[in-house]
Image (tube, coloured by chain):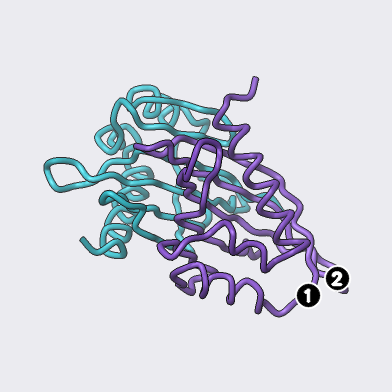
Chain colours: A purple, B cyan
Amino acid sequence: MEEQIDLVGKAFTDHYYHLFDNDRPALSSLYRPSSMLTFEGQKILGVEDITAKLTSLPFDQCQHVISTTDSQPSTFAGGIVVFVSGSLQLPGEEHHLRFSQMFHLVPIVEGNFFVQNDIFRLNYG
Amino acid sequence: MDPDAVAKAFVDHYYSTFDANRAGLGNLYQEGSMLTFEGQKIQGSQSIVAKLASLPFQQCKHNITTVDCQPSGAGGVLVFVSGTLQLAGEQHALKFSQMFHLMPTPQGSFYVLNDIFRLNYA
């Protein structure tokens, strides 16, 4: 039986990757000025720079296919850490790229979260 | 507190302890610590160490490829690791990713509050 925290983590990642694959600029709604992204080792701070980075990635279309989602409560104030693995399909590319990503979600109001921490890595080999 | 320095020191210590003496990992976890190991959820230092000590191999060697870290707020540090796990007698190393959420202790060190481990299959 799935616990509450798993449902929240899954609902968040479903929403996140849906936005990423269909309306990347709308990802800005999930970050704040204090948010941090490390994307393949590059560190980016704040919703504006993070959105600029994600919308400037060198592909127009993509599809995330999620294999695993693990969630745990993080500490005070209802934070959640979410660990995702899956693959990223780019149009025209024969092979999927495998990736892992972790999010630290912090609640704004009941049931709504923003991404305080985001770390993304491709899994090579 | 420099998150990069904390992360590097922690990762070095964690995996060298894991590879040399898994039971020694106990003092890195507390009662409220959580481990999700390949989807299985375990809580508390005792149960976590019992799980890690009972993994079906005697010897292993972690080789770390990437370490990323960020401050999580309130002095915490998030650490995201990828690498390979070589088991004695196995021809192919297993690829894995792992995340840790480290929290400061009153004594000035860190313990693992959250730990999530996943093998990366091809």
At mark 1, the secondary structure is loop
* Depicted A79 relative to depicted A60: above or below: above
Looking at the image, which is closer to me, B25 or A49? Answer: A49
Q: Is residue B85 visible?
A: no
- Asked whether the beta carbons under mark 2 and mark 1 sit within 8 Å of each other, the answer is yes
Classify residue B17 by image quadrant: top left
* Depicted B119 relative to depicted B35: above or below: below
Query: Label 2, on which residue?
Result: A91
Crowding near pointer 1: few (<14 within 10 Å), some, many (20+)? few
Looking at the image, which is closer to me, A78 or B76? Answer: A78
Q: Position of residue A35 (x, y in %)?
A: 45, 61
Amino acid marked by disc 1 = Asp
The chain containing the residue under callout 1 comes to A
* Depicted B3 relative to depicted B76: above or below: below
Query: Label 1, on which residue?
Result: A60
Q: Position of residue B91 (x, y in %)?
A: 62, 52
The residue at 51%/75% (across/down) is: A49
The residue at 31%/61% (across/down) is: B8
Amino acid marked by disc 2 = Pro
**Disc assigned to residue A104:** none
The residue at 64%/47% (across/down) is: A13
Q: Position of residue B67 (x, y in %)?
A: 43, 62
Count the marks: 2
